[in-house]
Structure formats: structure tokens, C-alpha cells
Image (spheres, grey):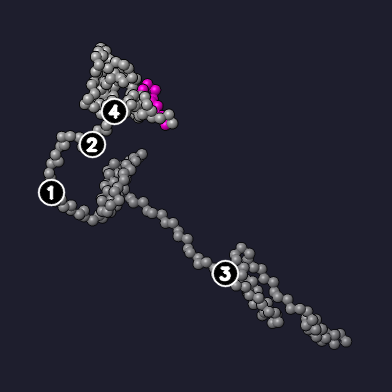
Amino acid sequence: MMKSFLYLLPLLGAFVLADETCQCPLVKCPADDAVKLCNCLNSRETMCKNHCPDYVPTYRPCPISPTNIPTPTPTSIPTATSTATQKPSCVCANKACPMIWPLSCYCANDIKKACYDKCGGPEPAYATCPSLPTLLTLGTPTTPTPTPTKPTTPNPTATHAICGGGRANYRPCSDGYTCIKEPGSTGCGPECDGLGICVREKMCGGFAAFGCEVEGQVCVDDPRDACDPKTGGADCGGLCVFEGYVHDDDDDE
């Protein structure tokens, strides 16, 4: 009886396994790399298909792994050995070179040599510079420029500020100046709402013969008073105006 039961055990196990659902093997995939994780999951699908033929695998499109560029290893530059020793606390002069070839090449070599002569140390490596081109200068006849006898730039003509006019657009003078009729003009000037010129309120002429302080000004009769040198006034004071405002028929004080 016992022997028959032992023969039946394999058959019973087969029936039990046939009823159970096929289980895919467990696979642990890395989670720190997206490319490796995707490839691992696809490999798990293949393993599950091989283990369970009825299983339908689902494959994922995986990103392309970036090309591994080797990181360059820094190499130490051997220090040139020389019998010459560098002077302690010696600083070479910082000079700028022209950005023109081959002048910049010669300039850089001169800076290296000057630094080596000053501070010593390892002898520098000089660059090989091409020969400088020869500059050809053509002699041209030079004609001396004549010196102008008169100034080429005319001097600006001094003027007086305009004043007077109608009440609607009356133009006053600055403090210390008064508005008078322009000497020699035919109009009546500020007295009848005409235009005039602003002159300094300071007397000139008279018995004391006061002169004008501003260069280029002359003393003319003050039209505001009743004194007129043309009618016999001897001590008539005047006002200073620029010479450009004085006409030939005006009498200076």
C-alpha cells in the first residue's frame, strides 16, 4: 500500500502544478540609471516569456546611452631645470604688445628677455619670428604753407540784446541794463512800442570824460535826456554801445 502511494505522488504534483498560474521570475533592476533600468525591464520580459510560454511580453523603447567621453587626465608640466636661480621677490614688468603680426612676436620675445635679464630663472623659449618687411618711403616735394596775414576765423560781432516792443510781447532788459533806441535808427524806438537795445545803465562822457569799460564799445549820447551835444550841450552824459551800432552821422561823446 505504501509503495503504491509513493508512485502516485508525482502524478498528484503534476496535477497541482498544472492548475497553478505560471509566475515570472523576480528581477531587481537598478533605479539610478534610466538606460540600465529600461534594458533590465526588457530583459525581464524576455526571461518571463522563456519561463512562461503563454506570457505576452511588453517591451519599452529605451533611450540611447550617451557616448562615454573619457575625462582627460591632467598631466603635470615638467619644470625646466636650469643652473640659473630666480631672484626672490622679483616681479617682471607687465607690458602690452601691438596686435599686429609680426611685431607682436618680436615684442613678446623682448618681454621674455627683459624678464629673464631682470629676474633670472630658467631661460625662456623664444618664438621664431619672421623678418620684418622693409618700409619704402618715397620723397615728395614739400611746399611751405604760407602764413596767413589775417585770421582765417572771423571774430564774432558783439551785439546788444533786443528789448521793447508792444505790450503783448514786451521784452525787458536784465538787471543793471536799460532799453534805449538804437543809435541812428529811423524809428521812434521803445517810446512808441518799437524795438530797442539793452545797454548798461552807466554814464560815460561828460566833463569827466568817463570811458567805456567793455572793449569795443564807444560812448554815444543818451537819447533819454534833453542834453544834446549837437545843440550846444557841453556836459552831456552818454551810454556805451558797441561800435557796430554807431553810424557815421552819430557823434561820439
Q: Residue at x 14, y 41 (%)?
A: 145
Is residue 56 shown left or right of residue 91? right
Which residue is denoted by mark 1 in the rendering?
140
Rounded to the nearest angstrom, the CA distance separating label 4 from label 2 is 30 Å
Residue 162 in the image, given as x and y percentages of width and height = 35, 29
Which residue is denoted by mark 4 in the rendering?
185
Q: Nearer the viewer, mark 4 or mark 3?
A: 4
- In this view, 2 is above or below 38: below
Q: Quadrant of the C terminus?
A: top left
Rounded to the nearest angstrom, the CA distance separating label 4 from label 3 is 99 Å
Rounded to the nearest angstrom, the CA distance separating label 1 from label 4 is 59 Å
Residue 37 in the image, given as x and y percentages of width and height = 62, 68
Kindly indicate the quadrant of the structure image that contains residue 238.
top left
First-in-chain label (4 vs 3):
3
Which residue is denoted by mark 2 in the rendering?
153
Q: Nearer the viewer, mark 3 or mark 2?
A: 2
Kindly indicate the quadrant of the structure image that contains residue 228.
top left
